């Protein structure tokens, strides 16, 4: 479905991609990880036909530079940085649907599922939405259409736990009939969503591993944490995850999305000295 064959990209004298070779098939969900500046976004821009580069990129056998329209017609793309569009959201949704031959109602349905108040946002300029609202709109434009390649650059970074749960469920529905490429600079953000991990380091593939594919993306775990003593900073962290305490901050209970469990354990690790017990069911 996608191939990169010895792809290199240089900006001025800086080699940002250095001989990347990868092949990804339908049904593969790839976490593209690496530190800031490793080359993840540049690789995606090559896949979208936006850059001249050395080596060969193909999407469904086509060169994305020479066949940009055909390639983009099959791609749902969530960019890392939302474009500063002044267009009202309603117009943007109509435009996005027209470009990819989708029905605006499909996009609106995904926006609503993600918790956006359509009647409130439709007349507002896109650029004036909050970060999370922009991200939900961009996700809806990528998922509210037929696409067999979903490319998402840090897609869940600004989403609250409830919206993440819905987003993971939407991805789950598409998992067998699309290639997914999900970038992040943190593996724990995306590890449980994928069945393959590719790490870039200074423009080279430093790791390419197939990983266990048995996490239910739609699962929710009922989680209880017991502490040795109450602590305000911990209470604040738990409130962000929607947890509540019924005994003055000594034990906390709440839901954790299955794919978020590593991220959640990462938060708990910061308070390891306080934690007396963890139960996740
Ligand atoms: N248009 C450009 N012109 C010049 N240099 C660029 C350009 N785009 C990216 N770079 C450089 O290429 C390198 C890789 O950038 P890239 O955005 O691909 O990294 P990344 O892995 O996506 O990082 P991040 O996690 O921070 O988003 C960086 O050093 C960046 O400064």
Image (spheres, rainbow, N blue to C red):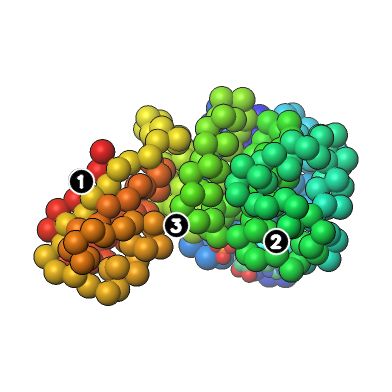
Q: Earlier in the sequence, mark 2 or mark 3?
A: 2
Q: Nearer the viewer, residue 23 or 13?
A: 23
Where 107 sits versus 133, above or below? above
Where 175 sits versus 14, above or below? above
Separation (CA) of disc 1 from disc 3? 25 Å
Disc 1 residue crowd, few under 14, some 14–19, many 20+, Cα 10 Å: few
Separation (CA) of disc 2 from disc 1? 38 Å
Could you tell me which residue is drawn at 65 percent across and 58 percent down? 133
Q: Mark 2 highlights which residue?
A: 82
Separation (CA) of disc 2 from disc 3? 20 Å
Q: Does ligand 1 reach within 8 Å of label 1's beta carbon?
A: no
Of badges 2 and 1, nearer the viewer stands 1
Q: Quadrant of ligand 1?
A: bottom right
Label 2: which secondary element: loop
Q: Quadrant of the C terminus?
A: top left
Instruction: Judge from the rendering whether residue 137 lies leftward or rightward of residue 52; answer left or right.
Output: left
Q: Mark 3 highlights which residue?
A: 186
Residue 208 seen by the camera: no
Q: Are marks 2 and 3 in contact (CB under 8 Å)?
A: no
Q: Quadrant of residue 174?
A: top right
Could you tell me which residue is drawn at 33 percent across and 56 percent down? 243
Q: Earlier in the sequence, mark 1 or mark 3?
A: 3
Label 1: which secondary element: strand
Residue 56 position within the rendered picture, expressed as x and y whole percent measured from the top left: 71, 41
Q: Quadrant of residue 273?
A: bottom left
Q: Mark 1 highlights which residue?
A: 279
Q: Which disc number belongs to residue 267?
A: none
Where 205 sits versus 194, above or below? below
Q: Nearer the viewer, residue 280 or 118?
A: 118
Q: Quadrant of residue 267?
A: bottom left
């Amino acid at each position: 479905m996608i191939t990169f064959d010895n792809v290199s990209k240089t900006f001025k004298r800086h080699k940002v991609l250095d001989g990347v070779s990868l092949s990804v098939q339908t049904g593969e969900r790839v976490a593209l990880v690496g530190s800031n500046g490793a080359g993840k976004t540049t690789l995606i821009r090559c896949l979208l036909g936006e850059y001249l580069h050395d080596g060969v990129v193909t999407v469904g056998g086509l060169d994305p530079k020479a066949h940009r329209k055909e390639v983009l017609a099959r791609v749902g793309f969530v960019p890392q940085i939302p474009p500063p569009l002044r267009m009202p959201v309603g117009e943007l949704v109509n435009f996005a649907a027209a470009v990819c031959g989708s029905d605006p109602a499909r996009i609106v349905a995904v926006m609503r599922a993600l918790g956006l108040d359509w009647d409130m946002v439709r007349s507002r300029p896109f650029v004036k939405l909050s970060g999370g609202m922009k991200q939900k709109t961009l996700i809806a434009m990528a998922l509210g259409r037929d696409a067999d390649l979903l490319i998402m650059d840090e897609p869940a970074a600004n989403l609250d736990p409830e919206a993440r749960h819905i987003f993971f469920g939407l991805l789950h529905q598409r998992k067998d009939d699309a290639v997914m490429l999900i970038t992040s600079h943190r593996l724990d953000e995306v590890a449980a969503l994928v069945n393959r991990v590719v790490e870039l380091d200074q423009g080279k593939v430093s790791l390419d591993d197939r990983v266990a594919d048995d996490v239910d993306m739609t699962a929710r775990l009922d989680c209880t944490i017991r502490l040795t003593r109450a602590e305000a900073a911990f209470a604040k962290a738990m409130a962000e995850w929607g947890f509540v305490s019924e005994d003055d901050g000594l034990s906390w209970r709440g839901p954790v999305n299955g794919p978020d469990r590593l991220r959640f354990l990462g938060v708990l690790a910061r308070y390891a000295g306080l934690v007396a017990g963890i139960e996740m069911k």
